[in-house]
Image (tube, rainbow, N blue to C red):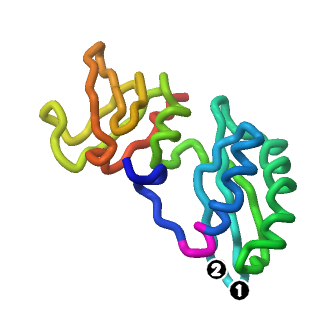
Amino acid sequence: MKTEEFMSERSRIAQQAFDLALPVVEGLGIDLVDAEYKKEGSSYYLRLFIDKRGGIGIDDCELVSKAVDSIFDKELHADPDYFEVSSPGLTRPLTSPSDFKRHEGEEVEASFYRPVNGTKHFTGIIKGVFDDKVLFESEGVPCEVPFDVIASAKRTIKF
């Protein structure tokens, strides 16, 4: 695996914000999942998406916002109209090894670029995450899938 965010593409400003925020957010014991910088209407928004095992609350968002705001004021090569910190949401795709690790033990639906064990679509539990692959289990049968074969994956939400 060459990059942590193997299915993510960011703008230059979003990548800079991600890089500046990453050590600060990790120091708070929270995972920085993604960053985006985009124009909506006449305003520019900078958003950080954070997560942790068990989920994110408003206090976590406020903590991260306060921790990185002054860094962005000094070092970010942009001046967004709005800065937000948010949970990535329940249905956000898993895009990195750390996403899969954070959701170990949970069920996911995955699609593959090529067949794995005879199928390109899979529903199963994340049993383990390794340097270059994920170990899933479905109906008691283990299935190892390299990250570069995973086209998409998202958590299965049951109510």
Q: In whole angstroms, how far apart are the C-alphas of marks 2 and 1?
A: 7 Å
| 28 left or right, relative to 96 | right
The residue most toward the bottom is 42
User: For the residue carrying disc 2, how many other residues have a C-alpha within 10 Å: few (<14), some (14-19), or many (20+)?
Assistant: few
> Dot 1: what SS?
loop
Image: 81 above or below 28: below
Q: Nearer the viewer, residue 114 or 70?
A: 70
**Span shown in magenta:** 11-15
Residue 74: x %, y % from top left? 83, 72
User: In the drawing, does residue 151 fall left or right of residue 56?
Assistant: left
Residue at 70%, 50% in the rendered image: 23
Front in this rendered view, residue 44 or 25: 25
Which residue lies under the disc numbered 1? Answer: 42
Q: Residue furthest top?
A: 140
Q: Residue at x 51, y 40 (%)?
A: 99
Location of the C terminus (image quadrant): top right
Asked if the stretch drawn in magenta spans residue 146, the answer is no
- Position of residue 7 relative to residue 149, above or below, is below
> Residue 26 bears which disc, if any?
none
Q: Tell me which residue sits at (47%, 36%) in the image.
A: 100
**14 in the magenta segment:** yes
Find disc 2 in the rendering and name its residue: 39
Q: Looking at the image, do the residues carrying marks 2 and 1 touch, with CB atoms under 8 Å apart?
A: yes
